[in-house]
Image: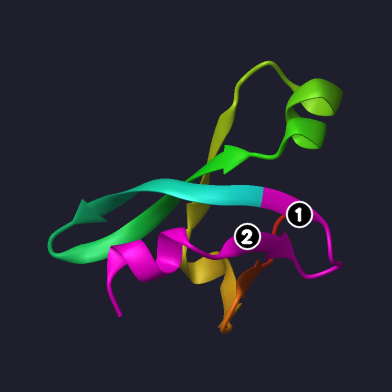
Amino acid sequence: MHLSDLQAKNIITTDGKLIGNIIDVIIENGTIKYLIVEKSKFLISMFTSKNEIEIKWEQIKTIGEDVIIVNYQ
């Protein structure tokens, strides 16, 4: 799988809330450690002015055809 394939998928929480889309990744020692996700408009306006978050690779539960499901509170 290519990074561009991941970037085309929406990031969704395990309870079905849209987080946003991948805009970058952080790689350490040749392994993806974090997905940098641009927050959806709803999350930006409701919780913080920061428009991106880091999701640990370990938080990914499923990578589907159209979405990536993550454990994120």
Q: Residues within 10 Å of mark 1 (few under 14, many from 20)?
A: some
The percent coordinates of residue 18 (x first, y second) are 76, 54
Q: CA distance from mark 2 to mark 1?
A: 6 Å
User: Residue at (59%, 26%) from the top-left corner?
Assistant: 51
User: Residue at (73%, 21%) from the top-left corner?
Assistant: 48
On the rendered structure, is 28 left or right of 50? left
Is 8 a magenta residue? yes
The percent coordinates of residue 11 (x first, y second) are 63, 60
Mark closest to the chain's N terminus, 2 or 1:
2
On the rendered structure, is 4 left or right of 45? left
The percent coordinates of residue 20 (x first, y second) are 64, 48
Above-or-below relation of 31 to 66:
above
The percent coordinates of residue 17 (x first, y second) are 83, 57
Q: Quadrant of the N terminus?
A: bottom left
On the rendered structure, is 39 left or right of 1? right
Residue annotated with mark 2: 11
User: Residue at (49%, 69%) from the top-left corner?
Assistant: 58
Circles 2 and 1: CB atoms closer than 8 Å: yes
What label sits on residue 37 in the rendered view? none
Above-or-below relation of 5 to 40:
below
Q: Which residues are magenta?
A: 1-19
SS at badge 1: strand
User: Residue at (58%, 83%) from the top-left corner?
Assistant: 64
Residue annotated with mark 1: 18
What is the quadrant of residue 10 in the picture? bottom right
